[in-house]
Image (tube, rainbow, N blue to C red):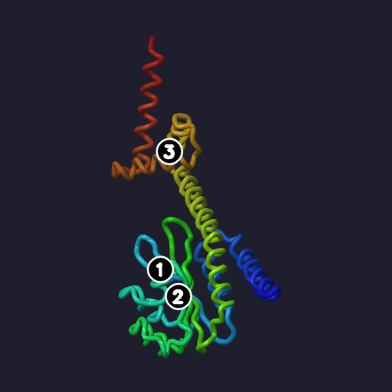
Amino acid sequence: MTELHTVEIAAVLRQLTARLIASDDLDEALEDLVETAADLVEGASWCAVTLVRSGGPSTAAASSGLPESLLDSQYGSGAGPSMEAIRARDLVLSDDLAADSRWPQWRSHALAAGVKAVLAVPVDIDEHVIGALTVYTAEPGSFTSDVGLTAMLVAEHAGLLLSAVLDRGRRADVHAELTEALADGETVNRAVGIMMVQRACSAEAALDVLRSTARRLDLPLTTVAGRLVQTVERRVSHDRQP
């Protein structure tokens, strides 16, 4: 690897870090990743991120100009470079789709859309979310070994950053739920306080216990909170009796 190329890779990773580190929104961060990765090759190029979550694979972000049919055609059959990269957990490359016999159904969509070469690398965000970063180009022979290496480094670096973004988003969701619950009334507020004392935990953790109980009993959160408060009040009243 030349010194110049090392500097170029460092610049790409710095750019990606600057874009993702301040984001609390996963969708926004993925759009930034797509924009950064599409610039890895010269000439007309596009990028998309496929994520596999509980509902199955889907396109989480994509450059404008990529037909939806091209992106979605892999998911039903499971055949295509993005899905192969996810399964193999390794780089998948076709530097000339016209001369490639793999993924015939997907390849016909790609060639019709003007895509002549494709490179896909796996992205691991956390134990619940994995996927692939896929770069498409309008000219065959666009992917040098340096581009492949850079794409793998970008994907690995992005996975770490996106994990932090996802974690911040989850904490923000919990905080919003806590705020909403406390706004429901004094009963929920008191129940959260009781749980915090009983379990020596944070307000967020106390609310999570109450919500889990409410889901398990199929009852409103306010009902579960009210029952907890009543139980504690009866216990305190009984203890105070001579």
Cα distance in 3D space between marks 2 and 3 = 52 Å
Type of amino acid under label 1: Ala
Q: Position of residue 117 (x, y in %)?
A: 47, 84
Task: Quarter of the image for the N terminus: give it.
Answer: bottom right
Residue 33, relative to residue 185: is it above or below?
A: below
Task: Give the label on residue 188, or none.
Answer: 3
Type of amino acid under label 2: Val
Helix, strand or loop at label 3? It is: helix
Residue 215, relative to residue 199: is it above or below?
A: below
Label pair 2/1, CB-CB below 8 angstroms: yes
Type of amino acid under label 3: Val
Residue 218 relative to residue 165: left or right: left
- Residue occupied by mark 2: 92
Q: Position of residue 233 (x, y in %)?
A: 39, 25
Other residues around mark 2 within 10 Å, as few (<14) / some (14–19) / many (≥20): many
At x 43% / y 87%, what residue is drawn?
97
Q: Is residue 126 visible?
A: yes
Residue extending farthest to the front is 1
Earlier along the polypeptide chain: callout 2 or callout 3?
A: 2
- Residue occupied by mark 1: 88
